[in-house]
Amino acid sequence: FSFSSEIRWATGRASAVHVQWASDHSKKDQQTVTLTLDDLSTPVGDYHTLQLSLVTRTDEPALLRVESFGCWPACFEPMPECVWSDEHFPASRRAEFVWRTHDHAIWQDAHGVSCHYNSLTQQQQRLVSSLWVSAPELLTRVMTTNRAKRFEPVLKKLQSRLAQRAVAVAQTPYGKMGAQIHIDKSYSPPRSARNALNAEVLAIHTLEQLVDQLNSIELSLAQLLVPMQALPNAIAALQEGSADQQLQTTIQHPLFQVK
């Protein structure tokens, strides 16, 4: 069964959206907001977490970034060969998806940023499209979280710039393939409750009681206090006499001092 590019795929859902980080580069007039989705479920796949970055710049199209270590499990496996990589850490890859009309010349450049999107499978393209379509709503929802207060100026600036885009989503490659991701904490998967561990309480008030308890589990006072690698003969010698004698002999022995 194959999907037609004209058919919108079923909606996705996630239990929460968080602001991971946000920055405003004043010299470049560039805003970057990194969001994390929890428990994301889509027809393409299910993700414990998915991280994306939205970038707006003066006189430049908006970007959506997905990094190789931003999704668990991986969003794109393998990553397209043409995506950006870190020369100091080649395993770190970054795909960028530009906001341009579907007939823009950039999509004809096989070696440019368009390759990041064009090299994906159709299902992976559907995921990217849904992230783009959902971006305004994700920003609106994340603004209600406590952590967002720290980044509120940047969030509002980026949100405003996205809203003022001259190009509508229907004019981009993402419009026909993406659908809204809904956020609701009730989508969080059930987690099993941990059983309380009721450990046995030992009421030991005297040395004799301690020795009795150790004897009940076939452990001597000397074995408790000296290194396990001690010679068996030395251990045996420390177990003679009363409890008080055993304690005094053990703590004065060189083996105990090593510990």
Image (cartoon, rainbow, N blue to C red):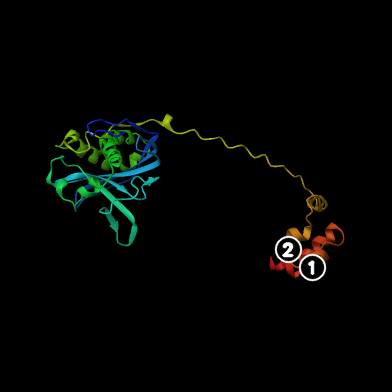
Mark 1: secondary structure:
helix
Percent across and percent down for residue 174 are: 22, 37
Query: The residue under label 1 is which amino acid type?
Result: Ala
Q: Are marks 2 and 1 in contact (CB under 8 Å)?
A: yes
> Which residue is denoted by mark 2 in the rendering?
226
Q: Alpha-carbon neighbours of circle 2 within 10 Å: few (<14), some, or many (≥20)?
A: many
Depth check, mark 2 against mark 1: the one in front is 1
Query: The residue under label 2 is which amino acid type?
Result: Val
Q: Alpha-carbon neighbours of circle 1 within 10 Å: few (<14), some, or many (≥20)?
A: few
Percent across and percent down for residue 114 are: 20, 48
The numbered mark at residue 234 is 1
25 shown above or below 158 = below
Which quadrant of the figure has residue 220?
Answer: bottom right
Compare marks 2 and 1 and give the one earlier in the sequence. Answer: 2
> Going by the image, does 116 lie left or right of 201?
left
Q: Which of the pair 23/149 is nearer the observer?
A: 23
Quadrant (top left/top right/bottom left/bottom right) for the C terminus: bottom right
Percent across and percent down for residue 9 are: 29, 31
Q: Which of the pair 84/144 is nearer the observer?
A: 84
